[in-house]
Image: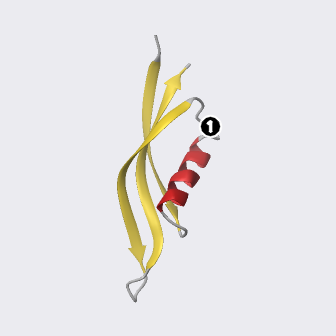
Amino acid sequence: MSVTKVIELNASSTQGIEDAVRQGLAKASRTVKNIKGVWINEIKAATNDDGGIKEWRVNMRINFVVD
């Protein structure tokens, strides 16, 4: 039998959505072990005054097995 836990976090990147997810997972994996998956709940973009995208933001849930 295994037990999993889900945590929710936000991450951002000026490079894009995939980079924001990768950075969030990298940061979480420093302290959370046995990560098995991630769900992207929400994607947002912060804009410049001229309407261009300056930063991508994601809200995600990370699933990991509890020891």
Residue at 45 percent of width and 66 percent of height: 56
Colouring used for the render:
secondary structure
Q: Helix or strand or loop: what does disc 1 sit on? A: loop
Residue 66: x and y, percent?
52, 22
Q: Residue furthest left?
A: 42
Percent of width and height locating residue 52: 42, 82
Q: Residue at x 40, y 52 (%)?
A: 59
Residue occupying the far bottom of the picture: 50
Q: Residue at x 57, y 29 (%)?
A: 34
Residue 26 at what x, y percent from top left? 61, 47
Q: State which quadrant residue 47 falls in.
A: bottom left
Circle 1 residues within 10 Å: few <14, some 14–19, many ≥20: few
Viewer-closest of 48 and 22: 22
Labels in figure, total: 1
Residue 67: % across, % down:
56, 19
Q: Residue furthest right?
A: 30
Outermost residue toward the top in this view: 1
Position of 61 with respect to 67 (left or right) is: left
53 w.r.t. 30: above or below: below
Residue labelled with disc 1: 31
Above/below status of 28 relative to 17: above
Going by the numbered disc 1, the residue's amino acid type is Thr
Looking at the image, is 58 positioned above or below residue 2? below
Q: Residue at x 55, y 46 (%)?
A: 25
